[in-house]
Amino acid sequence: MLRKHKLKTVLSLSIIPLALLGWIKSEEVRHTALLVHTDITKGYFLSGFSLQKPAWFVADKNAMFTEKSETLQINKGNWDISEPLILDGGLTIEPGAVLNFSKDSYVIVNGPLKAVGTDQMPIVFQGKDSQLWKGIYVHKAKSPSRLENIVISDTDAMASDRSELTGGVTFYRSNVSIKDTHFQNSRAEDGLNIILSEFEMVNTRFDKMWSDAIDSDYSNGVIKDGSFSNIGGDAIDFSETRGWVENPQISDVHDKGISAGENSVVSVMGGVIKSVGVAVASKDGSVVDIMETEIKDAALFGLMTYVKKSSYNLPELNAYNLFWGGAGTKASNNNWIRQNGTTLTINGQGVPEESLNVKALYRGPVMAK
């Protein structure tokens, strides 16, 4: 999540199913200025952008960069990046590029990021010698970003006196399509944070996340055929988001497989959620529909509805044709819990209400942060 910010905006929706159309509540965000130059590894110096009209100049032109109109291209090759790369304009990365980042380096793109690899020549962002680096921030791009056949490893959050992010990769007011991409080994609070944006994710894999894998705030999007494993927090965390999740494969998650909060509207279709703290939770004014999904081995509950923040309305969760614990295993009451006043239905039938000490849950071994 982006912190310490103040700017209001409302997004339109164009890339997700019509069933998800609707308004998005505005978030206050403070835009912080970007640096006007950066040093790149081995003494190469990139500067020359202005806020009005970007212009690129690379001293000692080398095989790493190609200059194009308002866009910098990183060419195929194995490159070490030892300083922050901060660009006012688009960034394109060729298939076969391998970028090795030092611990204090990162990428800020004030424009679209186009990184499209192939099966034979993926694009790799990784820490040099597997060390952590400060990740990627795509900021207020006027056209959609596209990531395909990418591996992103070893990220930590980007924090400085100019900005404080929680994502290893962050898209802020920047629509994005992500396909056939692998996020792994992130120590950030959110492996991928999407804010005030529209997104599409297809066949995207997350594993070895220290905390949440995906955190979507004030956004609209689709997550199809996503794979999540070895997640220290939530696999998918929605806040003020309208989301469609299709055929997720979620396993070995410490907290929640899918968490919908702060007036989110989420539909889940198919897939498997297993070996989790909680499979699906709807809280704080959210509405979740889940159908044809297999749920098993939840440490607390398969389904939960509860209120964490009293300023929101009561949440709702409706489940249809779920498979509990595999073929032939019957549903049982301990697969769900409905806090008093909330709505939780199984195949159209409401389940009994119960008192629930939410504060105690968040101090417990599963949901404690």
Image (cartoon, rainbow, N blue to C red):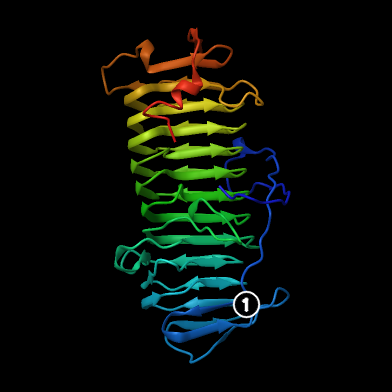
Would residue 159 be seen by someone viewing this image from the given angle? yes
Q: Residue pushed farthest top?
A: 352
Which residue is at 55% across, 47% downward? 1
Residue under pointer 1: 70
Count of picture labels: 1
Q: In the displayed structure, does residue 327 sit left or right of residue 63?
A: left
Would residue 347 be seen by someone viewing this image from the given angle? no
- Quarter of the C terminus within the rendering: top left
Q: Is residue 141 above or below residue 317?
A: below
Residue 262 image offset from top left, x and y in percent: 60, 32
Residue 269 image offset from top left, x and y in percent: 45, 32
Quadrant in the picture for residue 217: top right
Which residue is at 36% across, 44% downward? 227
Q: In the displayed structure, does residue 94 sit left or right of residue 46?
A: left
Residue 343 image offset from top left, x and y in percent: 56, 16
Q: Is residue 27 above or below residue 106?
A: above
Neighbour class for label 1 at 10 Å: few (<14), some, many (≥20)?
some
Q: Secondary structure at mark 1?
A: loop
Quadrant in the picture for residue 220: top right
Q: Disc 1 marks which amino acid?
A: Glu
Q: Residue pushed farthest bottom?
A: 60
Q: Is residue 277 above or below residue 351?
A: below
Residue 120 image offset from top left, x and y in percent: 30, 67
282 or 96: nearer the viewer = 282
Which residue is at 52% across, 26% downward? 282
Q: Is residue 187 above or below residue 68?
A: above
Quadrant in the picture for residue 62: bottom left
Q: Residue pushed farthest front?
A: 161
